[in-house]
Image (cartoon, rainbow, N blue to C red):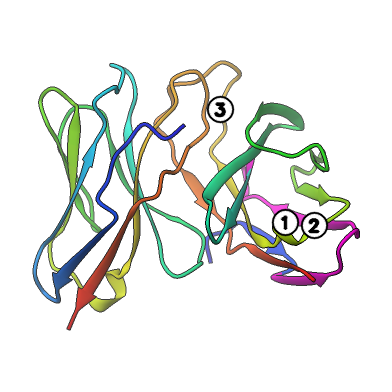
Amino acid sequence: DAKTTQPPSMDCAEGRAANLPCNHSTISGNEYVYWYRQIHSQGPQYIIHGLKNNETNEMASLIITEDRKSSTLILPHATLRDTAVYYCIVRVKAGNQFYFGTGTSLTVIP
Amino acid sequence: DSGVTQTPKHLITATGQRVTLRCSPRSGDLSVYWYQQSLDQGLQFLIQYYNGEERAKGNILERFSAQQFPDLHSELNLSSLELGDSALYFCASSVPLSPGQGDSNYGYTFGSGTRLTVV
């Protein structure tokens, strides 16, 4: 049921920006894009979400294309603790459930 | 500490047995969600409760059932356990939603999970 496509894995050098892409070409007009991450079998952790505009918080930035068919999560200065699986999720219109896809496994390299 | 409490953290049981997993949502959250994460399946949505009532069902087996009590804690009951039921089971809660409010921009808060091993 996941409506997103993400690369299965990525590497990033410590201290550099990590840019994680996500395609959601069938997104509807009132569906939000959410990002979560899961660090080694811990409960998934909310990162950020957005509808149309770019968003930034203390953890990350979210860049959504104008046509809303794709987005990029940016971790500005990746640390080793950012090594995790990152999930891009589109909120199901008719309900409140999150459907997780396979995510991107990000490895931050020292 | 996310505020969502799951017990027990680990559970080992034999095939054919029945277990109950417990979840206490964050204070004030009315919605509770259960997810299963197997090694080869990723995070699978099982079921959602809102203020004591079932709101949505996902890929939940008939051998599994859940309920949400008046104090808003929830229990997931797994019966006739099979080896394939071994997994991490996560509970999540979210801020209050009124019925039909499907466009909320609120996210979930997850608990730390219960690791179930069926032997």
Q: CA–CA distance between discs 2 and 1? A: 5 Å
Dot 2 falls on which chain? B
Please rate how many residues cluster around mark 3, counting C-alpha atoms within 10 Å: few if below 14, some from 14 to 19, many from 20: some
Q: Position of residue A80 (x, y in %)?
A: 25, 77
The residue labelled by disc 2 is B82
Q: Amino acid at mark 3?
A: Leu
Q: Position of residue A15 (x, y in %)?
A: 11, 74
The residue labelled by disc 3 is B97
Against B95, residue B88 (above or below) is below
Snapshot quadrant of residue A82? bottom left
Query: Any mark on residue B85, and which?
Result: 1
Report whether B58 appears left or right of A23. right
Mark 3 / mark 2, whichever is N-terminal = 2
Q: Are marks 1 and 3 on the same chain?
A: yes
Please name whichever residue, B63 or B91, is drawn nearer the observer in this view of the structure.
B63
Query: Contact (CB < 8 A) between labels 2 and 1?
Result: yes
Query: Any mark on residue B1, and which?
Result: none
Q: CA–CA distance between discs 3 and 2? A: 35 Å
Mark 1 / mark 3, whichever is N-terminal = 1
Secondary structure, mark 3, is loop
Does the segment drawn in magenta span residue A31? no
Q: Nearer the viewer, mark 1 or mark 3?
A: 1
Secondary structure, mark 2, is loop
Residue span colored magenta: B9-33
Q: Is residue B42 visible?
A: yes
Secondary structure, mark 1, is helix
Q: Amino acid at mark 1?
A: Asp
Identified at 80% across, 57% down, the residue is: B82
